[in-house]
Image: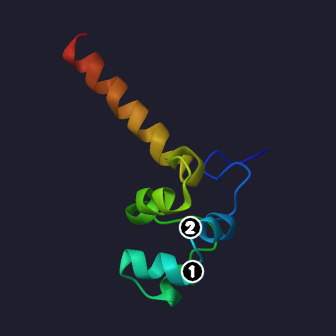
Amino acid sequence: MSNPDEPVGFTVEGVLALAGGRGAVAKALGVSVQSVAKWDRRIPSQHARKVAVLAGLPLEIVRPDMVQRGHNEASEYVKAAGK
């Protein structure tokens, strides 16, 4: 069974390659290359949006869990507002 938090068809290394590689991503984010190298299973949420833009990918590919959480929060807000 697949994990819904894993990107479909893209590994972290694949996303980083599309974004210009570890060095380019580290520089764009203002972090060390060593920090980026530690992202073996997922891109941290605080960096996911910028990495998605750098890679030219939608956020739902880079971090599908973040998109689902946003949809759930919006749905709850609409329900609470009585709309």
Residue 64 falls left or right of residue 49: right
Say whether residue 51 is left or right of residue 39.
left
CA distance for labels 2 and 1: 8 Å
The amino acid marked with disc number 2 is Ala
Residue pointed to by mark 1: 22
Mark 1 falls on what kind of element? helix
The residue lying toward the viewer, choosing from 9 and 4, is: 9
Q: Which quadrant of the figure contains the C terminus?
A: top left
Residue sitting at x 59%, y 48%: 61
Compared with 70, 76 (above or below) is above
| Residue 19 numbered mark, or none | 2
Q: Secondary structure at mark 2?
A: loop
User: Is residue 83 rendered to the left or right of residue 61?
Assistant: left
On screen, residue 70 above or below 38? above
Which colour style is shown? Answer: rainbow
Q: Position of residue 39 (x, y in %)?
A: 57, 74
Name the spot of residue 67 as percent of width and height, x first: 47, 41
Q: Nearer the viewer, residue 9 or 55?
A: 55
